[in-house]
Image (cartoon, rainbow, N blue to C red):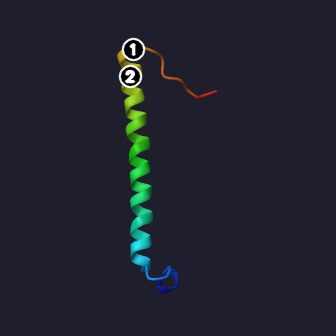
Amino acid sequence: MTRADVGLIPCEVLFAGGVLYLVAFSGLALFSAIADWKDYLERDVRYPDAIC
């Protein structure tokens, strides 16, 4: 793990940043999907199977 250091930035900070990045964007994607699902339910519209 010590070889993953970038300059003065230790590998633990880089790893934590990567995890934070993945968690943040996964949460954003999940929030967006849930919001779309609720919108489709409120409008009583069939949820699309795929986006063309």
Name above or below for residue 23 compared with residue 28.
Answer: below
Q: Position of residue 45 (x, y in %)?
A: 45, 15
Residue type (three-letter) at the residue carrying disc 2: Asp
Residue type (three-letter) at the residue carrying disc 1: Arg
Residue nearest the observer in this picture, 23 or 46: 23
Q: Position of residue 37 (x, y in %)?
A: 41, 27
Name the residue tied to disc 2.
Answer: 39
Q: Residue at x 43, y 35 (%)?
A: 33
Q: Residue at x 39, y 14 (%)?
A: 43
Q: Quadrant of residue 40?
A: top left
Residue furthest to the top: 44
Q: Residues within 10 Å of mark 1 (few under 14, many from 20)?
A: few
Left or right: 2, with 34 as reference point: right
User: Which circle marks residue 51 in the picture?
Assistant: none
Name the residue tied to disc 1.
Answer: 43
Callout 2–callout 1 Cβ contact below 8 Å: yes
Q: Where's the C terminus, which quadrant? A: top right
Q: Secondary structure at mark 1?
A: helix
Name above or below for residue 28 compared with residue 19.
Answer: above
Q: Secondary structure at mark 2?
A: helix
Q: Residue at x 38, y 20 (%)?
A: 41
Name above or below for residue 38 compared with residue 24.
Answer: above
Q: Position of residue 1 (x, y in %)?
A: 47, 83
Residue furthest to the bottom: 2
